[in-house]
Image (tube, coloured by chain):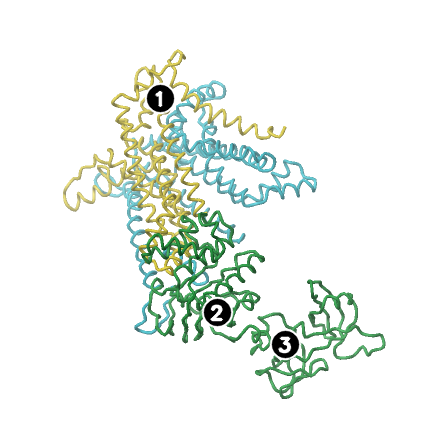
Amino acid sequence: MLVLPTLPFFLYVALFLLLPTVIVVVNAFQTKEGSFTLSNLALLGTPNVRSATFWTLGLSAISAVSGAVFGALLAYALATANPRGMLRRTIVAACSVLAQFGGVMLAFAFIATIGSTGSITTVIKSWTGVKIDTAWLYDFNGLLMVYAYFQIPLMVIVFLPALDGIRPQWREATETLGGSTWTYWSKVAGPILAPAFISSTLLLFANAFSAYATAAALITQENPLLALQIRGFISGEVVQDTTHSAQVVALLMVVIVTVVMVLYARLQRRASKWLG
Amino acid sequence: MAGVDVAGTAAAVDTPASTAGGPKRRRLRHTVRRKQAAFRVIVVTVLMAFFLIPLISLLDFSTRLRNNSRSGAAWSKVISIASATDASSQKVWQGLVNSFILVGLTVAIMLVLLVPTMTWIRLRLPRLRRVMEFVCLLPLTIPAIVLVVGLAPIYRQIASLLSTSPIWLCFAYAVLVLPFAYRALDAGLEAIDVKTMAEAARSLGSSWVGVIWRIVLPNIRTAVTSACFISLALVLGEYTVASLLSRTNLQTAIFIVSQDDPRFADALALVAMAIGFLLLFALSFFGSGRKARKV
Amino acid sequence: MHTRTGVSVSLQNLGRSFGPIHALDGMSLDLAPSEMVVLLGPSGCGKTTALRVLAGLEDADTGRVVVGGKDITNTPTNKRDMGMVFQAYSLFPHMTAQQNVEFGLRLRGMDAAARRKRAGENLELVGLSTQANRYAHQMSGGQQQRVALARALAIQPQVLLLDEPLSALDAKVRVQLRDQIRRIQLEIGITTLFVTHDQEEALAVADRVGVMRAGRIEQIDAPDVIYNAPITPFVAEFIGSTNRLPGHADGNMATVLGVRVPLLPGSPTSGQVSVLVRPEAVRLRPMTDGSDGSTAGTATVVATSFLGAHGRVQARLADDSLVIAQLASTDVAELSVGQRVVLVVQPAPALATAV
């Protein structure tokens, strides 16, 4: 049996990846007694979940686009630097840490910066005597800024290979054919990079959409995001979860992230054809 | 790309050519390069400020008391963490120990599951490659927070079969690291001709286990190392699953400690990020060293 | 097709250094209208830098670039009106072959119909009309380079620049494409500078070959002159293969293994010399049993190889040096390894160097 040696892997994945996913999906359509129902989905229309959905979508979209723009600029600055130089090595290593490792610590870092006794808050107060308002850190704009801290590095990591795939000959060919720098960017480099840029932005969107730890550490009193809604449901703040609320919200998240990742994979394929 | 052409045309030549020409000479290329260098400096400086200020603030906050005087108390707690007897130090130490055990177990599960299976599929079952890739990348589309929802009943079973010990989180963590470890190992296997090597070893009398242990593994050392590093970084930074399944690991311990002793927690956060950075910085040299030899 | 008279090109006393390396060291080169000059040399000799200075892709520290009587030293690349074909990967990957060829025309504001017609003509010229709608990743390396050539020619440039356009291709495609490039160049009469490190390629297509070394042109002449009458040992040894045989010079002749050989200008006129003798100027005669084993030219055959119409024999002289002879295959067949032979040098003009 040729398949035999692969069984451990597939069994493991079935137990710890597929089974949990199936549990989420099935439970979302089940009553507590186990019979099929669509009524659980009514949860998605409640004001709390609706507003959390819009928050999450908005936060993911804005942080993805802004992270993509700034990340692309930084990646471009690195692509023009010596590929074996210290600048590039250092920043790429720092980006891999910040993109993967932020989580709870990131929340601490920003509270230490612009929380009520944070460094910047203190410095401003001692210079101007004004105590600045710090509540925004725990609101939408605060999350946006904190998310930039891992979105920009992630963009650098996923977009840098695309920039490295740009051939110097394309600029030189453009010039010999009579094109200016503007021609090069608008007609050659821009269009070639577009699929990679958009697909990277989608990945950033999915990343922000799935993120939990940073928001959870920053916002402990309310649950304005879908991920935090799930926390609310499974940590039993809702007295009796008779309608599988956590599973319904989880299902919504899976569906949205899957759609985004499918688009991502499509564009990525095209990008790799052009820049491979 | 504007700058890439610098690297391309001057492959042998890194110094920007600045030898004196005629005084009135137009330096067409030279200006382009100078503009790029200026752009690089501005972008890197501005973004570095954004990234460094919060880290500096961690350092500042961890040593500043309410009355604005300085204290190294939080840092001496970090240094003596292994031997300290106060509740918060012990909590963090317990989390740290748990996390390192989890790293070991996760890496072991990851390697045992992936290396033989990936090798076997490349050698004998190429039809299954797409399936395996799809399965391994699946966790990217299933947020950890969603996985927790589905894992909760499974971990209730594990608790009754095994125990409630946090070390069983390794089962979930092996799934979380799957996409990253798969990509690293796949790149390593792609770079060598597994099939020919295996055929050579088999014709010389090696068993299949011998092929994987003696032939494949030594040749994908770099890939294995980077898969391990990524798993290490991911497991040490994991909060979502541990916190929602109420198990103690490094991150949940630091979070709990931060409620009572934010200075200590901030110092720990800074140390953890610095160690993560050093590990990945070291990895960048390791990886490129191997590549350089191949060229 | 646009047959035009080419323009003249003059590179005057170009200097260019990268730190301590002198890529160009007072290099001068004149191309007559419609001429194809090939710059040939080892890597790092400055040939590519010279071409890139002419294209405006590289600044020269000193010297002037004059095209059609006009000084363009300070003209940016995109105003120079030169068509350039790069080593590889220069096609824009997001455009079809047709769109690539139209690109330069679009920048010149040509209307769509005229553009399509001109691009079609140029694709036909390179034999790729049927591939017009393909993308780079759907074409072979040879096809990509032909599209790149069509793209460079479509703008009807004053000068065509070819930067090792064949070096990334398979041997067979390389020969086909090089002949095609030469045909097209002769047909439209465009002044062309071609850079390569492949001597066979250079000799095959050039009106004149310039052999470069350390930032200067060592010799520039028609291919047959470069091959038969090199003026420096570097040129003699870089082009084709040569044997260094010991000899004695007196005046414009030298004695090599007992044969009097005329010496080329530039050789020493007296004393012990090394004479640079081409393999095809060496003959081997099987030694008959009776002959004296101590004759100057006795050698032992150490290897023979069959190369089609001709073959090569490696023989070891008494002083242990190896000599390579190129013979007709039928002659090679008569020799066997270990056989004792006598070397006879043909009295073709050769270059000598002092020992």
Most foreground residue, C3 or B79: C3
- View extreme (left): residue: A129
Which chain hosts label 3?
A: C
How many angstroms separate mark 2 from mark 1 (CA)?
74 Å
**Which residue is painted at 61% across and 35% down in the image?**
B124
Q: On the rendered image, what quadrant is the N terminus of chain B found in?
A: bottom left
Instruction: Please name the residue shown 45% across and 60% down the image.
Output: C85
Circle 2 sits in a helix, a strand or a loop, which is it? strand
The percent position of residue B281, horizontal first and vertical second, equals 43, 47
Chain letter of mark 1 equals A
**Is label 1 in a helix, a strand or a loop?**
helix
Name the tint of chain B in the rendering.
Answer: cyan
**Figure quadrant of residue A202:** top left
In the image as oriented, which residue stretches furthest toward the bottom? C251
Q: Which one of the lettered chains is coloured green?
A: C
**As drawn, A211 above or below A180:** above
- Marking on residue A248: 1
The residue depicted at 63 percent of the width and 76 percent of the height is C276
Give the letter of the yellow chain.
Answer: A
Give neighbour class at mark 3: few <14, some 14-19, many 20+ (Cα, 10 Å). Answer: many
Report the side of C294 relative to B274 (left or right): right
User: To which residue does mark 2 refer?
Assistant: C36
Which kind of residue does numbered mark 1 sit on? Answer: Val
Q: Between residue C330 and residue A276, name the one nearer to us.
A: C330
List x then y, in percent, for residue B31. 32, 63
Q: Mark 3 belongs to which amino acid? A: Leu
- The amino acid sitting under disc 2 is Met
Say if labels 1 and 3 share a chain.
no
Are the residues tagged 1 and 3 within 8 Å (C-beta)? Answer: no
Mark 3 or mark 2: name the one nearer the start of the chain: 2
